Image (cartoon, rainbow, N blue to C red):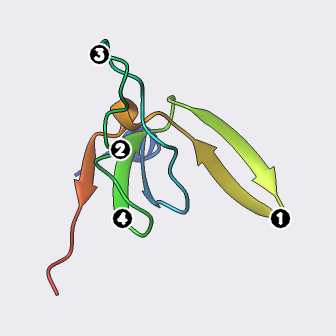
Amino acid sequence: IMPDLAKEINIFGKVIAVGPGLWNQSGTRNSMQCTVGDKVFFPKVMGKQVEFNDEEYYIIKECEILTIIKESK
């Protein structure tokens, strides 16, 4: 049983876009672990919440994602 406040601390979402990945010390980019369409779980306090065309979006860093939920096909 989770209190109502605890339910609002974390969010499930669907990845709609990803960036190119971070640069590493050797000068190449690290590949992204999440891809468009993945379902993710992340803390509500992370990232930036924006509204666009009456839709709510979160812009977050990949390292802020708690887990990527992969569904088996």
Residue 67 x/y as whole percent: 25, 47
Residue 63 x/y as whole percent: 35, 31
**Residue at the spot 48% in from the left edge and 43% down from the top edge:** 20
Q: CA distance from mark 1 to mark 3?
A: 41 Å
Residue corresponding to mark 3: 26
User: 23 or 59, which lies in front?
Assistant: 23
* Quadrant holding the C terminus: bottom left
Label 3: how many residues lie within 10 Å, few (<14), some (14-19) or many (20+)?
few
Q: CA distance from mark 2 to mark 3?
A: 46 Å
Q: Nearer the viewer, mark 1 or mark 2?
A: 1
The mark that comes first in sequence, 1 or 2, is 2
Residue 30 badge: none
Q: CA distance from mark 2 to mark 4?
A: 27 Å
* Residue 50 located left or right of residue 63: right
Label 4: how many residues lie within 10 Å, few (<14), some (14-19) or many (20+)?
some
* Residue 44 located left or right of residue 71: right
Residue 38 badge: 4
Residue 54 badge: 1
Q: Nearer the viewer, mark 1 or mark 3?
A: 3
Q: Indicate the quadrant where residue 37 lies.
A: bottom left
At numbered mark 4, what does the secondary structure look like: helix, strand or loop? loop
**Residue at the spot 55% in from the left edge and 57% down from the top edge:** 17
Residue 3 badge: 2
At numbered mark 1, what does the secondary structure look like: helix, strand or loop? loop
Kind of residue indicated by mark 4: Asp
* Residue 4 located left or right of residue 31: right
User: 5 or 21, which lies in front?
Assistant: 21
User: 28 or 54, which lies in front?
Assistant: 28
Kind of residue indicated by mark 3: Ser
Q: Indicate the quadrant where residue 22 lies.
A: top left
Q: Nearer the viewer, mark 4 or mark 1?
A: 4
